[in-house]
Amino acid sequence: MRFVLNGRSVSIDAPGSRRLLDVLRESLGFTGTKEGCGEGECGACSVLIDGEVVNSCLVAAGQVEGCDVVTVEGLANGAELSVLQQAFIERGAAQCGICTPGMLLAAHALLRENPRPSEDDVRTGLAGNLCRCTGYTKIIDAVLACRR
Amino acid sequence: MPEVTYLRPRDVADAARLYREHPTCRPLAGGTDVMVMLHAGALRPAPSALLDLWPLGELKGIRRVNGALEIGAAEPYTGIIRSALVREHLPALVAAAQTIGAAQIQNRGTLGGNLANASPAGDTLPVLLAYDATVVTDRRTISVSDFFTGYRKTALQPAELIVAVRFPLDGRTVRFRKVGTRAAQAISKVVMAVSREPARIAVGSVAEVPLRARDAEAALTRGDVAGAVAAITADIRPIDDVRSTAAYRRAVAQNVLRELLDASSRR
Amino acid sequence: MTNATASPAVGRSVPRREGADKVTGRARYTDDLVVPGAWYGKTIRSTVARGTLRSIKLDPGFDWSRVVVVTAEDIPGENVVQLIRDDQPALARLGGEIRHQAEPILLLAAADRATLEEATSHIAIAYDAMTPVLAIDDATETYSTIEIVKGDVDSALRDAAVVVERAFRVGLQEQLYIEPQGAIAQPNDRGGITVVGSLQCPYYVHRALKRALALTDEEAVVIQAETGGGFGGKEEYPSVVAIHAALLARKAGRPVRLIYDRHEDLAATTKRHPGTIRHRSGVRRDGTLVAQDIEIVLDGGAYCTLTPVVLSRAAIHAAGPYACPNVRIRARAVATNTPPNGAFRGFGAPQSLFAAELMVEHVAERLRVPSLDLRRKWMLRVGDSTATGQVLTESVSADLVLDAALKAAPAVRPSARPTVRHGRGLSLVFHGSGFTGSGEKKLSGKVAVECTRPGEFTILTASTEIGQGTKTIFSQIAADALGVTLEQVSVGAQDTSLVPDSGPTVASRTAMIVGGLIHEAAGELRERLAKVRKPKLPLRVDKTYVQPDSVHWDDQTYRGDAYPVYGWACTIADVDVDTATGEVRVTDVVTAVDCGKAIHPVMAEGQIEGGALQAVGWATIEEIKTQDGRYLNDRLATYIIPTALDAPRLKTILVENPYSGGPFGAKGIGELPMDGPAPAIIAAIHDATGVWLDEVPATPEKVLEACASS
C-alpha cells in the first residue's frame, strides 16, 4: 500500500488486514506508537489519519491507502520540538512517557480543531488516552499553555 | 491462523458482489469492534477476508431524502455530532454519539457497525428505536424494531449490507441518558431514549437485545407517567454481569425513565 | 573543575533528563527494541484454580520442530521464583499442585506469533481438579502473622467511656501500568543470559535468574529498559517474566521476546492485597483516644511473594497518624487459590489507613463532635510515640498539612441537579519512608559516583527511572553536592554488570536513602578531587548504606523505630453523588504533603497527583470480580481506570518540614499520595448522602443500595 507517513511517501508490501499499529512498529520501524491494550481502550496507539486522531490498533493497514498518517515521530521539525512537545517537558506532563506519544497526537488534533479549548474541552479531547502516572493535571496544563 | 485477505471494493455494488462471492468475509468499517475481535481471534466464524466499506463515499454523508434524514452506514460519529442537520432534527443521536468512547472511537465508529454488531449495550440503538428509524440495506428496508432478533443477532440475510439509516422528520423530541461504567470510554449499564409523543421508551443493556419497553409505553400513551415507571421493570430482563447487577439495572432504569419523563414535561 | 557559581539544581523544576526522548518517540521501551533473530515467547497457563497437574500432551500431528517447548524439566537451577519464601515454582511440575488460575505451566517460543497460536491449540493439559479456597474467610493457611502491642488495650477498652467498633473491606486493585510486562532474553558472551526488561528492581531479577538458571553473578546480566510505569507491579513480577524468557532463550539458543498483552497481564500478574480490617477504638467522654484494637486479614493469593512485608507495613500504619497509649494490632496474611498478590504503591498502608481514618469519622459521629477536632486532639506531634513505641523526634507535620489543606480547599459548590448531592471529606495520613525496621540495614544499598573525565561525572546506581523522576533528582542532588552544573552529570544505565545494587526502587526510599548515598558519595568525590591538582581519572567513590545509630528496631518484638522518618499528607475530597444512579463523581481533591524537601517541585506534585488519582480509582471504579478464582475483569474494557473526564481537579500543596537524615532534608513521597483519598471519598459520600459505606470500591451499585436501604 502507498501512503504518506510524517510527510514522506511510503510504499510497503504488507497484508491489508494487518493492524496499522503493527505495520508502523514492525514493518516500518516507527516504534513511537505504543500498544497498551490492543482493544482501542487506552489510546497509546493513537495516530493521525488525515488529521483525525484514531487508534491504530483498530485500523487495518489497507485502510490508509492514499492517506496522510502522522505519528509522534512526525511532530518535531527536525531537532526543533513542537510547542506542545516543549510544554510537555517543561510542565511535567510526561512521567513514564508510555502514554505520551498518543497523548501528544490527541492534543495536536484537539488544538487544530479548537485552538482555544477550555479545561473541559481538553479533558474531553484527551478522554481516549489513559494515563496512570500523572493524574492528567499537568497534561491538561501543558495543552492549555499552548492555546493560541 | 492464516492471514486474512483484505478486500477493497470500488463501490457498494462491487462490495455486495464480493460479499456474495466470499460469504465468510467480514464487512469492516471503522474497525472499532471487528479489529478488536480479529486480533483476539474471537470472530466466529473465522473470516477469510475483510471487506473494507470505509472508503465508500456512498456509505458516508448525511442528507435529507423525501422528508426523512438519512445517515450513511459508514459515516463516523464525529460527522454525526458535527452535522447541523442532525443537531437540529435528531439531538438525541448527537447526545448518544458523544457518549461513545472518546475522540478516537468517535472518529471511526459508525451506525452501520453499531447495528451489525447488535450488542445489547450499543449506545445509539435505543435512540434509533425511539426515533422509529429504518435500516436501509442494499436490498430492502428493515424497521429498527424488527432488526434485533436475538443476542447479537440481526434480521440481515447472508451477504446483506447495511447502506444507511433513515429517520422520519416528524418533530418528535427524544431524550437520552446513558449510565456508563465511567465518564468516557464506557460501556453502558443502562442506556435509554424516551419520547413522549409518540410514546417510545427504548432501553439497552437490560436484555439480550436493545428493546422497546412496551408495557411502559402503553402506560405513557395513557399519560400515566407513574405507571410507566412501574411497568418498565416488567418489560426488561437484566442480568448480573461483569459490569453491573440486575437489581441495579432495574432500579436505575426506573430512575432514569422518571428523570427523562420529568425533563420532557418541563419544556 | 567545580563551578562555585553554578546555581543550585535541588529545589528547581529542571527539565526531565529523558524528557526529549519521551516526547519524540525516541525512548525505547522493551517491545520497541529490535533484536535480530529473536523468536516470540508465550506462557501457557492453568485453567483451574486448584488441582494436580496430571499431564501435558503435545499433539504429535503438529510439527513441533518449529517450536521450542520448555517445561519444569528444563530448569537447570532451582524451580523457584526467588523472593521470600521459595514456595512459588517458575513452572508447575508434572504431578505437582496447581494453586491458581493462570499459573504458568509451560513455555513456547517460535519464529512468529502465528506459529505460537497454532502450537497452543495443539496442547492438551489435564488436571485432577481440587476444591479451591477462594474466600478470605475460608483460608486455612497463613503466610505471616504480626502482633504489635503497646500498653494494655483490654483494660483501656474496659475503662473507656465510649467504644466504637467497625469492620472494613478493601478490594483488589491492578497497577495498570500502561506498558504491559515484558522481557527479552538472550544468551550472552559470558556463558550466561542477558535479560532486558520493563522492571523496577534489576537486582531482584538478577537474583531470581541466578537461582533458576544456575548462573553466576557475572553470567546473569539484567538491564532495565525504559519502563512505562511500575507502581510496584514491576517490583517482583518481572522475575517471573525474566526467568521464563531466559529459559526459552537458553533452550532456543537465540533471543526470545516475551511480551505480555494486556489480557494476560490483567489475568495473571500481581494485584493489591485485598482484605478486611476490624477496628475498635476506645475514647474518654472528652474525646481523648485511649485504646485501639485492630485486626487485619490480608489475602496473599496462592503464593507468598512479598506478602509478609506488605502485612508489616499494613500493621505498622494501622493505628493511623495518632498518639494512643494502648494499642494492639493483630495482623495475618492468608493464602487463597487466587493469583498471587504483590506490591502496589502503598503496600498495605492504604488498606489499613482506610480503616483508621474512617474510624475517626465514626468516633466523631458517636460523640457528636467534628472529626476535625478529634484529629487535632489525637494527631502525632514531636515527642509522641507511635504504636510501635517509636518516639518521633523531628519532621512531624500532621498539623502543618492539615492546616495547609484546609486553607487551600475550594469553596463548596452545591450541585445544580436535584438528584445530585455534594459532599466533602477529609483524611490525615502518614507513611514511613524507606524499608521497615532493619530492612535498609539488610539491604545495604550501594551507589557510586565517578569522575570519568575532567568536568564529567556519572552516577552508578541500580535505582530505576519508572516515571517518578529518579534520573533527574539524582542528577540534581549530585550536581549540587559536586558544585557543578546538571549538564556535567549523567546517570549510567541500570545494568547489573555496570552498577552496584542500590536496593529496589520501592518503599519510598529512592530520594531519601539512595539519594542520600549519592549526596554523600558526590560530596566525598568533590573533596577528593579538590585535594589534588591533577587527579587520576576515572576517580570513583562508592558508598554503602549505614543505618543511623539513632534508629533502633526489634524484629522479634516488633517494637521501636519502624522507619527513620514519616511523610505526612492531608486530603480533602469533594464528590457529587447522583442518588438516582449511585454514581460518585470526585470533582476536586486537594492534597497537602510534607515530603521534607521537594528536590524537584513539579515532579513531587506529579507523584502526588498521580498517586491521588490511582487512589480515587481504587475507591470508586476499579473493581475486580472473580469467578472460580479467575478475574472476570481481564480486559481494559472491563478493568476501568479514570480517564481525563473522570479525574477530579487535583490541587497540590507542598509543605516542607525537612528531615535531618535526608539529602537536603528530603523524605519519601512515592507512596504517601495513595493513602489519603479513599477514606476521604467515603467520608464525602457520607457527607453527601448520610450513608456510610465500609468498603472500597464504593461502586454505584453499592452506593445506590446503601442509599435505598437507609
Image (spheres, helix red, strand yellow):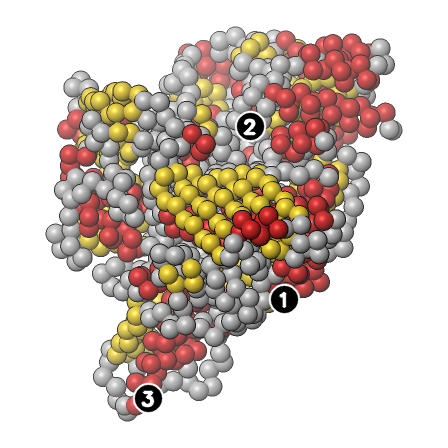
Say what secondary structure mark 1 lies in: helix
Q: Nearer the viewer, residue C15 or B69?
A: C15
Q: Nearer the viewer, residue C410 or C325?
A: C325
Of all chains, the one bearing label 1 is C
Residue C640 in sight in this render:
yes
* Measured Cα–Cα span from mark 1 to mark 3: 41 Å
* Measured Cα–Cα span from mark 2 to mark 1: 42 Å
Residue C15 in sight in this render:
no
Where is residue C638? Give x, y as percent.
Answer: 51, 32
Q: Residue at x 20, y 45 (%)?
A: C212
Q: Quadrant of the N terminus of chain C?
A: bottom left
Inspect the image, locate mark 3, and give the three-letter code of the amino acid beneath it: Ala
Q: Quadrant of the C terminus of chain C?
A: top right
Mark 3, residue position? C530
Of all chains, the one bearing label 3 is C
Residue C687 occupies quadrant: top right
Where is residue A63? Give x, y as percent.
Answer: 46, 32
Mark 2, residue position? B243
- Which of discs 2 and 1 lies nearer the camera? The answer is 1
Mark 1, residue position? C400
Q: Nearer the viewer, residue A145 or C390?
A: C390
Q: Residue at x 55, y 70 (%)?
A: C383
Is label 2 on the same chain as label 1?
Answer: no
Numbered circles on residues, count: 3
Where is B253 relative to A74, above or below?
A: above
